[in-house]
Amino acid sequence: MQKRVLSSAIALALTALASGSALAQSSVTIYGNIDVSFDRIKRDAGADASAALLAGGVPNANVAAVNAALSGPQSLNRVGPDMSAQSSIGFKGVEDLGGGYKGNFVLEGQVGTDNGALLRDGRLFGRQAFVGLTTPFGEVRLGRQYAPIFFSSAVITTERFGGTDQFVEGGLTNALNIRWDNAITYSAQMGGFRGQLGFSPNAGVADYVNANRGGNGSDANGSILGGNNSGASSEKTSGRGRSYGAFGAYTMDALTLSLGYGATSFKNVNVGLLTLPSALALFQMGDYKVWNLGAKYVLKDLGLTFNGTFGRGSYDISGVSANPNALARSLFGLENGSLAVSSLVLGTRYDIGAMGFIAQWSEVKFRNEGRGKNQGITLGAEYSLSKRTTLYTRYAQVKDSGTGPAVVFALTGIREVPSLGLSVPPATDGKVSLFGLGVRHNF
């Protein structure tokens, strides 16, 4: 085995887009990073939305679960994973076939450093699992891999998509904007341009969308979008889950510009609370489309980086008015037509010697129903003990405004972002904050 130091698992995904640079020799490499911290998470009470929700007709069997998710202040001290970067372990291999052709593979999983459990809903290789062929004209990959639109933020953010990174991809589809099941992609690079096209017959959509995940998620029981069993049916006869995407970025001197696009067909999938039967779905979703625009400017001599993204996603919810359950309209304000959400993220980083300082601000807002937005901030500092080991601290906060879309959509399996990667979402009209000290080691 040959070991290679990588700055992070995300760096592998980005450099692999450059079809020749990351695959320079025939080898098998073990790589990854471990990120662990001591955190304090605090959530205030916010407004009391539970009474309104129960008045909307949620069956008594679900009252306790709904109230537990919606009510009361909470605080938590923990040893937690992935605050500044997602812990991962991966295996990548390459075989030089000659003539500019190479075969390659990546198998990459995510392990919780607090208890050693497999994350990504228990998937062994939940981050990436694909085989590829590099040619003089680009690279083709087949398997579970990053969605093209993910790279439009990945090439912009100065963070590493840890729990306090506010950068998002313009939508609220849990992991569906980050990774696809059953994906086929083509990547190429020429000069300062790099890009990717992608398709999946089912990127990860079950026949019923709710908050079920892990082993509980399935077509029969429902699942979050992008859940571990959501893409088990590679292609549904209805076309549900079929996804298309594209990404492009251009770097010229200190400036990098990026653009990403994605579309997923939901085919009027029923969306409901927790494990309610589909007959009581809140609404139905049709097609989903999202785009994301990013920019980064680096003042290398001063150690300064400025970056930002703006994105917008929209769901066709034309089935909401035909749904016999009026809860979606009376409580959430959803109307017949479409549900649109926009995201704006601004960030900066300052490096001096072994020290680094970061700041990010974000806003995720529902555009056409006027009933909620989330605003988030992150402040952080880190000190590099070596090229592989870093001490860091982070403070982050997300504030929910409006009637609580962060809570409501978390319960339906469609999570509004930013979410800090926390198990405790902000309460309605409330906020959740995190402070932690940690260490990150790359290998």
Image (cartoon, grey):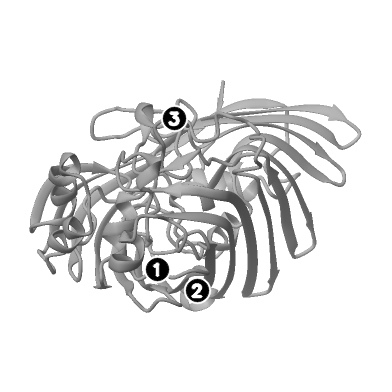
Q: How far across and down, in percent of the image, does residue 152 sit?
A: 59, 62
Q: Amino acid at mark 1?
A: Leu
Residue at label 2?
A: 307
| Residue at 59% over, 40% down | 145
Q: Considering only vertical position in the picture, is 419 above or below 423?
A: below
Residue 155 placement, left or right of 353: right
Residue at label 1?
A: 334
Which class describes the residues within 10 Å of circle 3: few (<14), some (14-19), or many (20+)?
A: few
Is any part of residue 379 visible from this angle? no
- Dot 3 lies on which element? loop
Q: Amino acid at mark 2?
A: Asn
What is the quadrant of residue 203 in the picture? top right
In this orientation, which residue lies closer to the viewer: 238 or 300?
238
Is any part of residue 84 visible from this angle? yes
Where the N terminus falls, by quadrant? top right
N-term-proximal mark, 1 vs 3: 3
In this orientation, which residue lies closer to the viewer: 183 or 92?
183
N-term-proximal mark, 3 vs 2: 3
Q: How far across and down, in percent of the image, does residue 374 sit?
A: 32, 70
In the picture as drawn, the residue positioned furthest to the top comes out as 1
Which class describes the residues within 10 Å of circle 1: few (<14), some (14-19), or many (20+)?
A: many
Q: Considering only vertical position in the picture, is 205 above or below 305?
A: above
Residue 53 placement, left or right of 236: left
Q: Considering only vertical position in the picture, is 342 above or below 382?
A: below
- Dot 2 lies on which element? strand
Residue at label 3?
A: 220
Mark 1 or mark 2, which is nearer to you? 1
Q: How far across and down, in percent of the image, does residue 141 sit?
A: 71, 37
Q: Amino acid at mark 3?
A: Ala
N-term-proximal mark, 1 vs 2: 2
Q: CA distance from mark 1 to mark 3?
A: 26 Å
